[in-house]
């Protein structure tokens, strides 16, 4: 059951309140704003929101002009909240919600994504392995961007097969690591 709300920051759904399920750790407006500032335009992008929780990151991308978003979360309450938020914002026609574990979704998805958000629970193991699996998959478009959220108490490698770290920023207990496919730095 959704218990908290957060606002869409910008775009066509600006100001709408999104519901977040009790099981989610919603990405704050401050962090979402910083991420989209670092990303620049997302217009026309195909987006994958893994560990979507409330779907706030994907909804924000759609609101800012992304073409399509696939939302993945294994929690039924999160999937219900995402569906509600998409319907409420009028963005359900540009999206698909998949109620399945992230690693299983990576094996079954067939689209090519320009932008991927990976925001797992901080205590969940396997983020490095998931990023490695994604880097080696055909899911990433040329020059795709992968945004990984993790605790400041953990660090991620600067390279995965085909993915290189572009930027890393800390916001309180959250570190945002932004990778690009084909990045050689």
Image (spheres, rainbow, N blue to C red):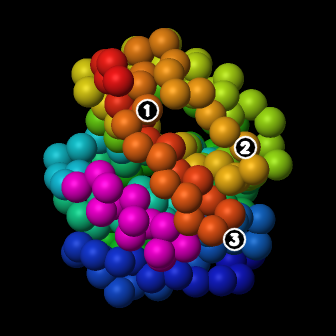
* Identity of the residue drawn at 66% across and 39% down: 155
Position of 81 relative to 15 (above/below): above
CA gap, disc 2 and disc 3: 25 Å
- Marks 2 & 3, CB-CB < 8 Å contact: no
Q: Which residues are magenta?
A: 27-40
Position of 85 relative to 69 (above/below): below
- Marks 3 & 1, CB-CB < 8 Å contact: no
Q: Position of residue 36 (x, y in %)?
A: 33, 60
Q: Which residue is mark 2?
A: 154
CA gap, disc 3 and disc 1: 31 Å
Name the quadrant of the N terminus: bottom right
Please tell me whether residue 36 belongs to the stretch shown in magenta: yes
- Marks 2 & 1, CB-CB < 8 Å contact: no
Element type where label 3 sits in the image: strand
105 lies left or right of 109: right
Element type where label 2 sits in the image: loop
Q: Which residue is mark 1?
A: 165
Q: Main secondary structure of the magenta part?
A: helix
Question: Along the line of sight, which residue is nearer the eye, 6 or 111?
Answer: 6
Q: Position of residue 61 (x, y in %)?
A: 33, 58
The numbered dot on residue 21 is 3
């Amino acid at each position: 059951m959704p218990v908290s709300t957060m606002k869409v920051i910008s775009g066509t759904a600006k100001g709408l309140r999104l519901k977040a399920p009790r099981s989610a750790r919603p990405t704050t407006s401050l962090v979402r704003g910083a991420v989209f500032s670092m990303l620049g335009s997302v217009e026309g992008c195909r987006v994958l929101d893994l560990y979507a929780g409330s779907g706030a990151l994907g909804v924000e991308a759609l609101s800012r002009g992304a073409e399509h978003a696939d939302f993945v979360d294994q929690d039924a309450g999160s999937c219900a909240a995402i569906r509600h938020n998409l319907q409420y914002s009028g963005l359900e026609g540009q999206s698909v919600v998949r109620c399945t574990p992230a690693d299983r979704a990576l094996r079954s998805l067939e689209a090519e994504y320009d932008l991927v958000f990976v925001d797992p629970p901080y205590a969940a193991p396997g983020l490095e392995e998931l990023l490695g699996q994604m880097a080696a998959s055909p899911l990433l478009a040329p020059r795709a961007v992968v945004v990984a959220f993790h605790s400041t108490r953990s660090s991620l490698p600067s390279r995965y097969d085909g993915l290189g770290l572009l930027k890393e920023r800390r916001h309180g207990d959250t570190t945002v690591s932004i990778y690009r496919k084909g990045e050689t730095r």
